[in-house]
Amino acid sequence: MSPTRFASEHKWIYIGAIVILVGMAIAGLIKYSTVKRDTQTAAKANQLSEDLVAAGYPAPDTETVEYVLGTDGGAVCEDPGSALTTALQRIQQLTNGATGPGMRPIIADTKAIGAERIVLQVYCPEKVDDFDEAVDELKTDDTVRR
Amino acid sequence: MSSMDVPADLPKQPSAAARAGSAATPTLTWVTLALMTTSSVASLRAAPTMAVYGLACVFLYLVPAIVFLLPTALVSAELASGWSGGVYRWVAEGLSKPLGFLAVWCQFAMTIFYYPSLLAFVASTIAYIIDPALASNGLYTAIVIMVLYWTGVWVSSRGTKALAGLASWGLIIGTLIPGTVLVVLGMVFLGQGNPSAAPMDSSHLLPQWTGLASLVLIVNNFLSYSGMEMNAVHVSSLKDPAKEYPKSMFMAVGLVLLIFILPALAISWVVPADQLSLTAGVMQAFDAFFSYFGVGWMTPIAAVMLISASLGGMLTWLAGPSKGLLEISRSEGYLPPFLQKLNKYGIQQNILVTQGVVTSVIALMYAFIPNVSSVYWIFSTITTQVYLIVYLLMFAAAMRLRKSQPDHPRGYRVPAIGLVCTVGLLSSLAALAIGFVPPSQFGTGSVWSYVLMIGGGLTVLGLLIPWAFLKFRKPSWRTAAAESTGGPS
């Protein structure tokens, strides 16, 4: 195969990759709706802040909480008890610092699990039982210095 | 450099794949190889996790870097600057050919389980962009894994140069640019006079010590750097391997450290640890970070960038271990001829396709096995255990080669190689031992059943299968094309 033809074929691979990634970015931007802050989001964020403080956590930045969790808890409340969610979405909370093939589960921090439960209590209390069932058997420890 | 410094076997004895038409002339620059190596190992995925540890994340990355990354990087720099072919060749030369096969088999077998977990992360990130509800849909996850894997095989089958470019750009777009944005925003945050959310004083330099859990965290972080040696299999694609590979490796070490440490620190400055814990997932953590600055819309763009980095990393893994497996199998006849077949670009297409079949089966498990999380964690631990066999063999081979072939030309020589290899060996053994400690997911299960599962998986995948290939190989499996290439002698 001539170098010209070889490079030409690579060009289409690059173009294809760029089109797909840019397409996803545009779709993401369209889909991403910045949560309009209102009295409801503020009330939820304040309630979360109070519950966290009562449970021994420091008060979070409520403005950021309003943006991230809105009124419905956003992705945190998206089927939190499912096996797949447990396996994949919490991958980062329960693993070491590897991002390559060295990724391995560790003994997670106790408060990391507890904080998520409080979010569910505030934003989607009906899903707390599912979550408890999913994380009930997790072994945790205080591995984060606070 | 004098001609004596150039390993005689590098430019003069191209690999089997090269002879078959893939790369008779240099196809990679040392910078590209450094980017490929970095792409194989590091991305921003772990930044929110490690940000939770605050300043201690520096310790959690630096200590493993000293005891595992440096030995791995230095030793592979010396070996690759002296012998072409990667880990199989080093171990074959230093220890024995069957052990060389074992080394590259373990490196290859590990990836079979790595791809599904990596691509499942990509699937959940795409779901975050399109519809978060998809993340808990097993069929969706399985389809995404299979589509992306087979696309990766197709790209890889076009030749090393195609994937090298994509992997390099994946690193730049998906890791270096967003990583720089995170660090700049973090510095802006501090520059505005805001106090760091995570305490940055000397009392927070070390992670919390709670005994076994802390030991598991620290030792398992050694594995953050696994894969640094993998791209050495492409060393013969460099113009001057003896000189350029060490440069490439040192650049990769610097990049990997920067990518792991600085973005994690930047996030810890802005988002308090407990607030990071409120968000169940990587993208939600990035959302919290960007939302603080009022640029939450950057989250889906960051998601796409992370996807490109993950896919770039996958491409390097598709091309590396399978190429090493092919090369030793062609010269020694360790695999059936079907698996040794090359396509017109000199790529080991049948190995990749066979691997793809297994990957697809694993992907289908996401769709049809309800309690997938148990399977997932067991696989990920077994694969890292299997990979550690590679390092044990590599360090042992390096020490042996220095004694058995002290005058063999090497472009780079590790100072105090005995000490460096001993540290690497002990670190690998420690990580292997810690792999038998049940993680959070097995909290209430029996310790012994966990040990049996991991030990059984390690034995089957890392020892029994390669032993079976060696035991049942036939003389006819040794291909004539490879015999003439001057493979491991």
Image (tube, coloured by chain):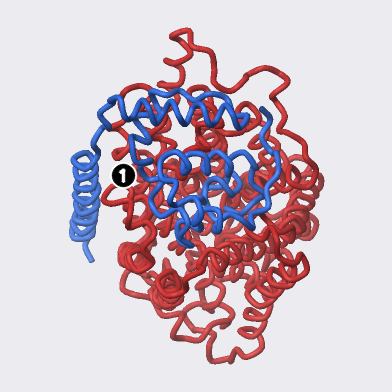
- Res. B433 visible in picture: yes
Q: Chain of mark 1?
A: B
The one nearer the camera, B22 or B1, is B22
Numbered-mark total: 1
Q: Which SS class for mark 1?
A: helix
Is B283 placed left or right of B275 in the picture? Answer: left
Question: Horizontal and vertical percent for residue B435?
Answer: 71, 58
The one nearer the camera, A143 or B87, is A143
**Residue under pointer 1:** B304
- Res. B34 visible in picture: no
Q: Which chain is blue?
A: A
Q: Amino acid at mark 1?
A: Val
Q: Which chain is red?
A: B
Q: Which residue is painted at 66% across and 78% down in the image?
A: B460
B282 in relation to B141, above or below: above
Question: Horizontal and vertical percent for residue B122?
Answer: 38, 54
Residue A62: image quadrant is top left
Question: Horizontal and vertical percent for residue A31?
Answer: 21, 43
Residue B348: image quadrant is bottom left
